[in-house]
Amino acid sequence: QVQLVESGGDSVQPGGSLRLSCVATGSTPDYYAIGWFRQYPGKEREGVSCIAYYDGSTHYKDSVKGRFAISSGHTTGTVSLQMNNLKPEDSGVYYCAIAPTHGCELAPHYYPTATWGKGTLVTVSS
């Protein structure tokens, strides 16, 4: 079964930037979407952004629109999340997951649990 590995998390000051990477290991389906999610202590896991391989459609959480950009790499199953003008509320463990769909959704339950990566920590503070 396909597994995803996240990387790129770090500690940065407000206004800084990070680029997260999600790389799939194993075979990906013909149609799939990869989503980025984050979880801050005491808060529920939330969808940040997603991209569908089928048509390239994307979605973003309202609070990150204009600051984050998701993109696919030249290698199938590789997705990046460029995070600019980071705010303290962007802190959390970021996860990526894959779903065999034509489009993408930000709801975490849409993605099979077994495909989720281990996460990468992003800390935004002064």
Image (cartoon, rainbow, N blue to C red):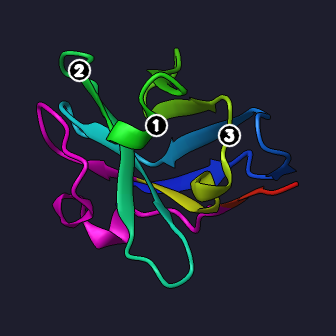
Task: Examine the image and state in which quarter residue 21 appears.
Answer: top right
> Of the numbered discs in the image, which one, if any, rests on residue 57?
2
Residue 40 lies, with reference to residue 120, above or below; the image says below
Q: Which residue bears the numbered disc 1? A: 64
Question: Which residue is more in the foreground, 86 or 35?
Answer: 86
Q: Is residue 125 visible?
A: yes
Quadrant in the picture for the C terminus? bottom right
For marks 2 and 3 on the same chain, the one whose residue lies earlier in the sequence: 2
Q: Tell me what residue is drawn at x 23 percent, y 37 percent.
A: 32
Magenta region includes residue 119? yes
Report the Cα–Cα distance between label 1 and label 3: 9 Å
Q: Secondary structure at mark 1?
A: helix
Q: Secondary structure at mark 2?
A: loop
Magenta region includes residue 22? no
Q: Secondary structure at mark 3?
A: loop
Point out residue 101 in the picture as x, y percentages from the top left corner. Answer: 13, 40
| Magenta region, residue range | 97-120
Q: Which residue bears the numbered disc 3? A: 86
